[in-house]
Image (cartoon, helix red, strand yellow):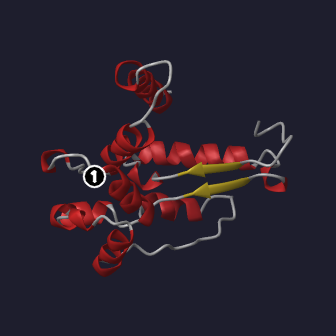
Amino acid sequence: LWREQRRPLCLLLDNVDEILDQRLRNQLIGALDGLWKTNAPLSHSLVVAGRPGPLQDAIQTSTIKFYRLVLMSLDDREMDSLLQRYGALDLLPVLDAHLREVVQSPDLLSALAQSIHDISRAEVPRNAGQIYRLLVDYQLFRNDNGAYDYWRVKRLVLAELAFTMLTQ
């Protein structure tokens, strides 16, 4: 699809700051440069999102001309205000310093607020992956009346699909 250029595409790479291995970071930059050299700037766009760090610094030296946009994290007051708007003030007691750091972005805070209502304190997620898993399990598929049982069939298939996508 990228090379065919039948229609404009936007490739979004998120959490690139989590690539800790220097070799993998260099491979990613090489792959992005290669994609971009296929006349992509004429019709496609590329968004690379991550926190400041070595990969972001290396991307600035690539042949691709990136525009830098800095999004500020939510502070404690803003988090509390959003939780009030979400009707999720019951989350305040479980938001320790670590979890507040994890949910500094509005999308993660929203996902947590939408998904945590029916779980016990022992099940409070500790990272973004656990938050999104709760969102899928309890918000998106809570009332699923499809032909296949979510908990016994669909969830396993989705997990296998996610694992396959991450390992290929």
Q: Residue at x 15, y 65 (%)?
A: 93
User: Relative to residue 30, is residue 76 depicted above or below?
Assistant: below
Question: Residue 132: image x %, image y %?
Answer: 38, 46
Outermost residue to the left: 122
User: Relative to residue 113, is residue 168 depicted above or below?
Assistant: above
Q: Nearer the viewer, residue 52 or 90?
A: 90
Looking at the image, residue 135 sits to the left or right of residue 31; the answer is left
Looking at the image, residue 40 sits to the left or right of residue 138; the answer is right
Looking at the image, residue 40 sits to the left or right of residue 21; the answer is right
Visible in this render: residue 52?
no
Image label count: 1
Question: Residue 2: image x %, image y %?
Answer: 76, 40
Q: Residue at x 30, y 81 (%)?
A: 77
Assign a secondary structure to mark 1. Answer: loop
User: Relative to residue 139, is residue 97 depicted above or below?
Assistant: below
**Within 10 Å of the Cα at label 1, are there few (<14), some (14-19), or many (20+) other Cα atoms?**
few
Outermost residue to the bottom: 77
Circle 1 sits on which residue? 117
Question: Residue 24: image x %, image y %?
Answer: 46, 42
Q: Nearer the viewer, residue 98 or 76?
A: 76
Question: Residue 156: image x %, image y %?
Answer: 38, 22
Quadrant housing residue 159:
top left
Q: Residue at x 33, y 48 (%)?
A: 131
Which quadrant: the N terminus?
A: top right
Q: Nearer the viewer, residue 99 or 55?
A: 99
